[in-house]
Amino acid sequence: MLEAGLQPYGISYNAGLIAGAKKCEAAKAEGWLSKMQRAGLQTDVSTYNGIMNACAKAGEPAGAQNWFEQMISAGLKPDAISYSSVMSLRKGGQCSSDERL
């Protein structure tokens, strides 16, 4: 997309975050968030939910908690999905080794 001279919208970056979450790859999801911020795009609750979900699924409670706190610091109000991601941390991660491939 960028190679073609097109500027992606925030939803394009959020899709990358969600893909990282589905594959239990918190680092990739965080990479998409960094790209989004460098592009000067505004993050929203969906962005933070995606990154928290990725951390929660990967069994990274400190990361999910950090992003939850950053979302609140950014002035965004957590929704039911936000709280669900944080609560899923009690399960200790949700991905099997097969899902990480």
Image (cartoon, rainbow, N blue to C red):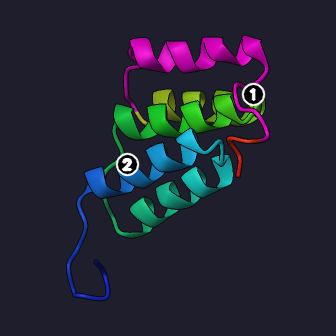
Residue found at the far front of this picture:
98
Residue 99 appears left or right of 68: right
Q: Residue at x 49, y 59 (%)?
A: 32
Q: Which residue is mark 1?
A: 61
Tell me which numbered mark, 1 or 2, is placed earlier along the sequence: 2
Q: Report the span colored magenta.
A: 75-97
Q: Residue at x 56, y 41 (%)?
A: 21
State the mark number for residue 88. none
3 in relation to 75, above or below: below
Q: Is residue 55 magenta?
A: no
Kind of residue at disc 1:
Pro
Residue 72 percent across, percent down from the top left: 48, 27
The quarter of the image holding the N terminus is bottom left
Q: Secondary structure at mark 2?
A: helix
Residue 48 percent across, percent down from the top left: 46, 36
Q: Quadrant of residue 47?
A: top left
- Closer to the camera, 72 or 14? 14
Does the CB distance between marks 1 and 2 fall below 8 Å? no
Q: Residues within 10 Å of mark 1 (few under 14, many from 20)?
A: many
Residue 67 percent across, percent down from the top left: 59, 35
Residue 95 appears left or right of 9: right
**C-alpha distance separating marks 1 and 2:** 21 Å
Q: Which residue is mark 2?
A: 14
Q: Residue at x 74, y 42 (%)?
A: 98
Q: Is residue 85 magenta?
A: yes
